[in-house]
């Protein structure tokens, strides 16, 4: 069972003070949990009156942008489920222009250099396999 999300987690989420994996976990929970959305909106309303919807919360408190490396992994489809969802929300729901531009740039590079991306994909799989063995 996943760790429940506490009020302090939501506060940190609004402050963008969490690691990307944790941001993604809370983001996923928010999408499924209307109560949590209300809780987040209430926290934010206390902080800053005039914010009405979760969409606005997201836009105003622009979630931390993923690194270019994360974008690259997303493009290759090698991220875990939570991070994949985080990227989808960041790119499609929030529509972060900066990351969309980065993502499109990576995409066009990948199209130009299929052999390079294939090598990178292998590298990612090998490193994650190695990680699993150590754990
Ligand atoms: Zn971004």
Image (cartoon, rainbow, N blue to C red):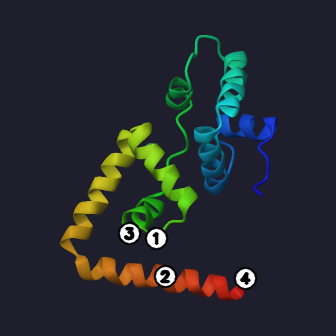
- Left or right: residue 38 versus residue 62 is right
- Left or right: residue 45 versus residue 73 is right
Mark 1 / mark 2, whichever is N-terminal: 1
Residue receiving disc 1: 78
* SS for callout 1: loop
Q: Nearer the viewer, residue 53 or 104?
A: 53
Residue receiving disc 4: 135
Q: Is residue 100 visible?
A: yes
Mark 2 / mark 4, whichever is N-terminal: 2
Q: CA distance from mark 3 to mark 1?
A: 6 Å
| Above-or-below relation of 15 to 103 | above
Image disc number at residue 125? 2
| Above-or-below relation of 108 to 96 | below
Q: Nearer the viewer, residue 94 or 60?
A: 94
Q: Are marks 3 and 1 in contact (CB under 8 Å)?
A: yes
Q: CA distance from mark 2 to mark 4?
A: 15 Å
| Above-or-below relation of 44 to 3 | above
**Rendering quarter of residue 97:** top left
- Quadrant showing the N terminus: bottom right
* SS for callout 3: helix
How many numbered marks does the figure carry?
Answer: 4
Residue receiving disc 3: 76
Q: Are marks 1 and 2 in contact (CB under 8 Å)?
A: yes
- Quadrant showing the C terminus: bottom right
Residue at position x 60%, y 44% from top?
Answer: 27
Classify mark 1: residues with Cα within 10 Å, few (<14), some (14-19) or many (20+).
some
Q: CA distance from mark 3 to mark 4?
A: 24 Å
Q: Position of residue 39 (x, y in %)?
A: 72, 27
**Rendering quarter of residue 104:** bottom left
């Amino acid at each position: 069972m996943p760790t429940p999300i506490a009020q302090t987690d939501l506060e940190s989420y609004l402050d963008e003070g969490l690691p990307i994996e944790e941001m993604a976990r809370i983001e996923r929970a928010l999408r499924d949990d209307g109560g949590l959305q209300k809780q987040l909106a209430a926290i934010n309303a206390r902080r800053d009156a005039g914010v009405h919807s979760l969409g606005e919360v997201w836009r105003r408190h622009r979630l931390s942008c993923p690194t270019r490396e994360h974008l690259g992994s997303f493009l290759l489809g090698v991220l875990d489920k939570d991070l994949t969802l985080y990227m989808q929300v960041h790119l499609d729901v929030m529509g972060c222009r900066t990351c969309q531009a980065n993502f499109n740039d990576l995409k066009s590079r990948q199209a130009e250099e299929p052999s390079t991306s294939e090598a990178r994909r292998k590298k990612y799989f090998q490193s994650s396999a190695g990680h699993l063995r150590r754990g």
